[in-house]
Amino acid sequence: MNAELPPLVVPFRGERYAPAGLSAVLAPPYDVIAPEDRPRYAARDSHNIVHLIVPEAPAAESRYARAAALLEEWRGAGVLRRDPADAVYVVAQGFALPTGEPRTRLGMFAAVVAEPFTAGRVRPHERTHAAPKADRLALLEATRTNLESIFVLAPDADRALAHALGRVARDPADVRAELDGVDIRLWVVAGPAAHQLATLAGRAPLYIADGHHRYETAVAYARTHPQADRVLALVVSATDPGLTILPTHRIIVGASPDPARLAVAWRQWFDVVRVVPGADSLGRKSDAPLDAVPELGKTPAVRALDIARVEALVVRMILGAGTTTPMLGYTADPRAALAAVRNGSAAAAVLVNPTRVDQVFAVADSGGVMPPKSTYFVPKVPSGLVLLPLGNAAESP
């Protein structure tokens, strides 16, 4: 890393809820909260973080101003309090895979530099859209606070970060909570140990797993607020055994494809076989003239992805095969995808392999972008465990 650049990862003086009753004030990230689910989180507690990250207000009022007013009200009432010193916040999330297998993912909340991607120290793999960034920027301008975290991966080839986080997690947790079936433990690490963990996390470029819109929003905010050039991030070692990416199987509703006609075209690129009902293996790919398919992507790293090939050669062909306008849904459960076809609620299901972490790195390193819904990291990073005040907000006691 360039010694003239600011540190990539640093501890920060976080703002937190009181540990008692913490589960009631947590929520998932804003972009996975469906409109019908927001009332459920809001009803758990009048101080639930959802009131800030997905704010509501009467038609004549700004919902962003409402979030800022609530935040200041909560601060004044002592609902949220600043920690006494800079720290990193180690967090363990215990969860179960769809198969029932238990796993634990270990990471740490820290303040990551918010700088343009051209600096090369934080690398994306997704394309972003203007509307979500405008929404998050308006909220950030109003609250001057990172209310929730992005999720980044640290390469950690020697596993030094993973081992250091594991040593912290051997001690009893400072805080415990639960969110939607995920067990959460948190340790507050201050002093030299916090700086050591931050140094380990920032030895190499970081890769965004989730939160591309929020990161680009933080960069935009830093352009006009140079002293607020940090973004709250959960940093996870790429070698962490609990790091999990689930597949995003495609479910197509409303199409009317002719399987026989589609199969003729697919034989250019795939071995097309009939599958015995209940079988897990759905066939295999053969060598094919994929260079003739520009829709696969611009870089070799993207073109090599199973999901890019399936999206371009299978899903889009099915979507364009019928006479009605189809809808595309997603699920991580292959049984649910197949059941939807068998019971007639879907016209087709396309099962895909999960994207691997090394593929995420390769695409990001190449400057490419993956197709939509290429990665599904689980569990989602909970909102409300710790906040990062910025600028003038960071100067309050």
Image (cartoon, grey):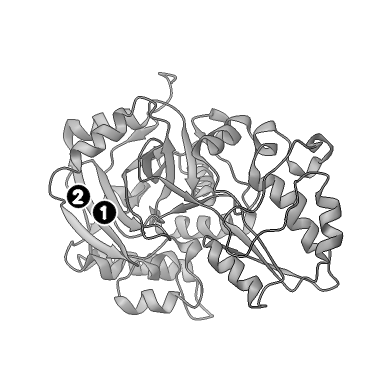
Helix or strand or loop: what does disc 1 sit on? strand
The reply to whether residue 229 is visible in this rendering is no
Label 2 residue SS: loop
Q: Residue at x 19, y 62 (%)?
A: 18
Observer-nearest residue: 273 or 373? 273
Residue type (three-letter) at the residue carrying disc 1: Glu
Residue at x 40% of width, y 63% of height: 28
Q: Is residue 100 visible?
A: yes
Residue occupying the point 43% across, 26% down:
204
Observer-nearest residue: 280 or 3?
A: 280
Q: Which residue is mark 2?
A: 83
For badge 2, the amino acid type reads: Asp
Task: Give the residue number, with chain letter if any, for mark 1.
Answer: 15
Q: Tell me where residue 228 sits by quadrant.
A: top left
The x and y percentages for residue 334 are 55, 61
Is residue 4 toward the left or the right of residue 322 in the image? left
Dot label at residue 78: none
